[in-house]
Image (tube, rainbow, N blue to C red):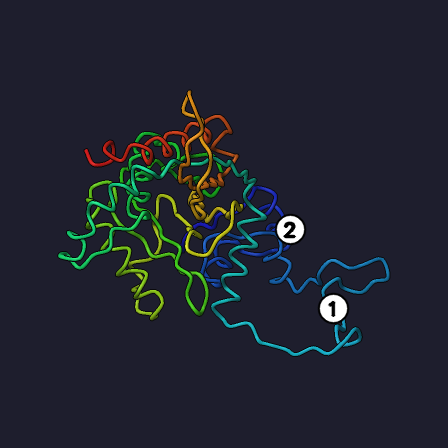
Amino acid sequence: MTAAIASPSTRALAGRKGIDIDALADELGRETIAKEDLDRKAGDKPSAAADGTSYWDVDHSAFGPVTEEPMSRFAQVASDNLAAAQALIPAVTHHDRADMSAIESFRATLKEEGRARGVKLTALAFQVRALARTLRDFPRFNASLSPDGKTLIMKNFVHIGIAVDTPRGLLVPVIRDADRKGLWAIAAEIADLAGRAKDRKVRPEEMGGASMSITNLGSIGGTAFTPIVNPPELAILGITRAEIAPVWDGDTFKPVPMAPLDLSYDHRVINGADAARFLAQFARLLADPRRILI
């Protein structure tokens, strides 16, 4: 039985309700437990409005036509995990931008080689490699907090989760030892994992155990968002679509492709200054990709 990740107040509540919190985590098939899970297990009713009715128990058809669509088992598990993570982790999101002009120029020179290899060298491959390097430079980010919140588990490996949008919801397969792989290998693995995730062919051993995850909305759009930290990871990196922005070079403004970066982190372990330094270092590596090729 795996020890559940839960706040001290949640563990205390579990004791009062007579619930084995670790057994409940195994029953739900996840690692994090929040107060809402204990309420559901104990059969408690959701919070009620002043008139005694549940906030959730609303007859929406009284206001107009409605239809019903059942939530899949996969979506229900994901919903519970996200709610537990949001309830457990005091998360903060730090925002920055990265100059992608050097990477885009470099990628343009490698198109022919990419065709020969049968691999598309995406910006995401550079971002995975840069994140792996940054995690080595900031080992506190490459850690997990013990369930009782008293011990940091420092990891001597760097595995990067890649969030993939699939028809049945978000899946996060993991690139193992990303700090020890070259750009072409990372690019090929991203394409392989993403393709198999959409076809429901990712194996269980290819999920979980990430040092940190990337959720990239660049192909869809947006300028910023606040990704939810996925415990037992301590941080998650969100990236949105690069846009041309005027950047002052000391003499004049130049058009530069800038990628918005959104780092959500567990404030119990990581403070704001360290988060700012982490994201600044990541942005520096993207601005000068030669540094991640060494």
Residue, far front: 252
Q: Secondary structure at mark 1?
A: loop
Q: CA distance from mark 1 to mark 2?
A: 27 Å
Q: Is residue 64 above or below residue 273?
A: below
Identity of the residue drawn at 33% across and 38% down:
101
Q: Position of residue 135 (x, y in %)?
A: 33, 35
The amino acid at mark 2 is Arg
Q: Which residue is mark 1?
A: 57
**Quadrant in which the C terminus appears:** top left
In the figure, is residue 294 to the left or right of 143? left
The amino acid at mark 1 is Asp
Do callouts 1 and 2 mark residues in contact (Cβ within 8 Å)?
no
Which of the pair 160/217 is nearer the observer?
217
Q: Which residue is mark 2?
A: 16
Q: Position of residue 94 (x, y in %)?
A: 51, 36
Mark 2 crowd level (few <14, some 14–19, many ≥20, 10 Å Cα) = few
In the figure, is residue 172 to the left or right of 54? left
Identity of the residue drawn at 42% across and 61% down:
165
Which of the pair 133/270 is nearer the observer?
133
Q: In which quadrant of the rendered view does residue 289 lie?
A: top left
Q: Is residue 52 above or below residue 35?
A: below
Identity of the residue drawn at 38% across and 35% down:
99
**Quadrant in which the N terminus appears:** bottom left
Identity of the residue drawn at 55% across and 72% down:
71
